[in-house]
Amino acid sequence: MKIDDQKIRNIGISAHIDSGKTTLTERILYYTKRIHAIHDVKGKDGVGATMDSMELEKERGITIASAATYCEWKGHEINIIDTPGHVDFTIEVERSLRVLDGAILVLCAVGGVQSQSITVDRQMKRYKVPSIAFINKCDRSGANPFRVIGQLKTKLGHNAVAMQIPIGLENEAEGVVDLVGMKALHFDGDNGEIVRETEIPQNILEEAKAKREELIDAASLFSDELTEAILNENEITSELIYAALRKGTLKRELTPVYMGSAYKNKAIQPLLDGVNYLLPCPSEIENVAMDMDKNEELVVLENDSEKPIVALVFKLEDGQYGQLTYIRVYQGTVAKGSTIVNIRNGKKVKVGRVVRMHADQMEDVEALKSGYIGALFGIECSSGDTFTSPGINLTMISMYIPKPVISLAIVPKDNKSQLAMAKALNRFSKEDPTFKTFVDNETADTIIEGMGELHLDIYVERMRREYGADVTIGNPRVAYRETITQRADFNYTHKKQTGGAGQFGRIAGYLEPISDADFIFENKIFGGAIPTQYIPACEKGFKQSMAKGPKLEFPITGVKVVINDGASHAVDSSDMAFQAAARGAFKEAYLRAKPVVHEPIMKVVVETPSEFQGSVMGLLNQRRGMIIGSQDEDVICVIESQVPLAEMFGFSTILRSATQGKAQFTMEFAIYRQVPQSIAEKIALEAAQNKKSAA
Amino acid sequence: MLTNNSFLKREDNVIHLTYKDIVMIKKEMIYRNPLINLGYESEDILPNGGFGAVLAHAGLGKTALLVQVALNAMLREQPVLHVSLNDAVSKVDVWYQELFHDIAAKFDTTEINDYWDKIQPYRFIMTFKVEGFSAPRLEERLTDLMQQNIFKPHTVIIDGFKFDEAGRGQLVQLKELARKYSMRIWFTVHTHRHEPPQENGLPLSFLHVSDLFDVIVQLVAKGDEVYIKSLKGKSIDSGQNDLLLDPATMLIKDRQ
């Protein structure tokens, strides 16, 4: 590798949908000479932006999968992960953040900090990713970067400080003033590729001086040298300022803010300088793994290419030549021909081709050193797997993976589609841990599960386009769950004598509700009322019963089973008999334990112009929503609510028509909560009908 | 939404541990309610259309005290509108959750969480920018909620109102609003250290509106302890002593 560790940047570009991050990435690639022409996301030339490599992404103008790419800027190597902006794909965002060392938070100069930015920012906090901000779209009418900086402070709690001030806004956006170098920067040439430095225009000189003061003030908190220089009235050099700003940024106590317009090719180059100056290199970030041999003790990894390999698979893609596995190397060197072990299943693999990615083009390399992001060919694994050198047993901390909340039945039209569908489903469930698939034993339907309507929608579309699977889809179904609310005893005897060997088993004990686990089995039998060899069969029987409630047939959670008595027969008792006894016992006690249905409740945040506030609240209220509160911000109002997922189908269309398309909303899973009695009755009726039609 | 109180009713054939706990939490809450302890008979303290104020320097716990007043109302199934001119909705929500869990700390977590889910609909948080807040704006928002039967507040908490900047007119308008909708409004009043109190203990910047208030209490720090002192209202007459609060939770602390 030609570049030393200090000059590597692994960064992500995270933001609200439509704030222009794909356009920004496109410009970065252009200025760093990775591409030689610029295409817009929804461009007239039909080529689309380089990072949106999937056809579907191009059509919808959104980024679905985080394509990894790299480029070079002023001697630094920058690896970029383009992250999806929609909440339904947050697992992708979280996975990207896991492997990043820093991020650019892109905000819209008009829309400012929107609810999605808040979600993304929370994720960055969770993974402690230092960030700089870029206020994009300064050319748009209504652009006000300083209002956005204010929102960064108040809404996201960032200590945001402007690195630049704009030279003109909206139609008159010409360039920016660099507050560190105190120069005006203009961007000439057809695509803004020529950066021209001039003196600061007189009309904004005073403002620039004042903002520079603010910048230096903020930076001085992180550097004694800078404070000293200020107090002694010595010369304050750019190096001194950048060093202080860098310290603050790495501690996540300061967010330097750049501004410009990616679409109009304004001020992207200074942002790249900012990435070099202010975001961390891999060795400045502490990464930890868990030692499986030492009871998952945390081990700090060293960013040393000579040490044993520890690498994380953060993304899979199905390419022309088979599976492409994106990895981030945290320690050691993954070279062509080296042997690595998949910690999840203990399988040893020999590394074949090693490549570095530039959207959907690739470049072969000999090795990936620690700190690098790249891809391997022909390796069978799943997203989130850890690869290590043979002999060590470390795993990267598993990512938080939410359980799916919505499901859909899909039916292939013909045999060919059936095969294509199976292939696609296999791939998707490997790529995305929040996407699950299984076959319903009763209806023989293939069911897909995910995190929201759009999430599943995109996968169905991909199935059709990329795999040519012609499928029809059923109505989306909410992932209800059942649980019990009180203790109930059981004492059940399973007895069968129908010729040949009989079946006998008696189990007694009780069920009780628990909140911190799905299922606990406790054996309190003393004196061998049930022989020890049948206890596992009892547990298995109870566990089987948890898969489906006896009445509504939803999965059961939060049950503790305690067995304290029973009886067996020397000849007729068997594993099978005790399993059947356990199922019978569960059924007997379950209905007396006052079962209730729980439903997924989503956190729904709507941003709407104030004049529609009343009608939006009405819409949420009609959907059994509980409004937590409303936040009035000049012309915009943000309403936070919790709404059952079952009531949210088609909400986007209704919201659009109620607000003339001016409101937008985000939705994410919040908690499971008990369904009100009247709704539970409706669900029970539907379940009964489904059962009938399946029969 | 607001009339459903079936969760508090006892059914004959079921052992209701939860019911007992709820009663206990309510008792705990009332026992711990600093204002009731100042000698008020009605749990509402303020009459319909009444104004109450909690005065203190920054950081002494004005918001915490009023969140307790709000929680007390929520436990009685009385809807509370919390208007904050300082904090975001999520931050205000954290105040409630933390105080509720502090008070209910000795009860079973699952039941507490369930109970919190049940009383949460009795609270609505609205935040405004200080400069964007006015009585007509609040009325506009309230009408939105009331017309659609989404929320009708019984108690309103206004946190962060600038008494030194707002004229008397604003408060008179709010008072009319309180009367019109049969609400009672509690305010936090930020007092400044550089401003010496007048004879009646009230700061100068508050004097011009003090007659509009039925109850005025003040939080006073003495060393590491915080006292609640009545400046206007019932306890002045009833001769109650000042109450001592635990500065960590702002709950009443027993005098040892």
Image (tube, rainbow, N blue to C red):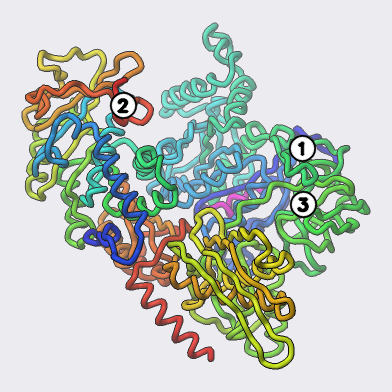
Mark 3, Cα crowd under 10 Å, few <14 / some 14-19 / many 20+, is: many
Mark 1, Cα crowd under 10 Å, few <14 / some 14-19 / many 20+, is: many
Q: State which region is magenta.
A: A20-28
Direction from residue B253 to residue A162 in the image, left or right: right
Marking on residue B253: 2
Q: Earlier in the sequence, mark 3 or mark 1?
A: 1
The CA distance from mark 3 to mark 2 is 53 Å
Look at the magenta stretch and give its main secondary structure: helix
Closer to the camera in the image, B31 or A575: A575
Would you say the residues marked 3 and 1 are in contact, meaning their CB atoms lie under 8 Å apart? no
Is residue A21 a member of the stretch shown in magenta? yes
Which amino acid is tagged 1?
Answer: Leu
Residue B135 drawn at (x, y percent): 15, 43
Is residue A529 a member of the stretch shown in magenta? no
Which residue is farthest bottom? A499
Provide the chain ID for the residue under circle 1.
A
Q: Secondary structure at mark 3?
A: strand
Front position among marks 2 and 1: 2
Residue A621 drawn at (x, y percent): 29, 63
Q: Secondary structure at mark 2?
A: loop
Which amino acid is tagged 3?
Answer: Thr
Direction from residue B93 to residue A88 in the image, left or right: right
Which amino acid is tagged 2?
Answer: Lys
Closer to the camera in the image, A216 or A654: A654
Q: Residue at x 59, y 84 (%)?
A: A442
Q: Residue at x 62, y 19 (%)?
A: A240
The CA distance from mark 2 to mark 1 is 48 Å
Read off the residue under disc 1. Answer: A301
Direction from residue A547 to residue B182 in the image, left or right: left
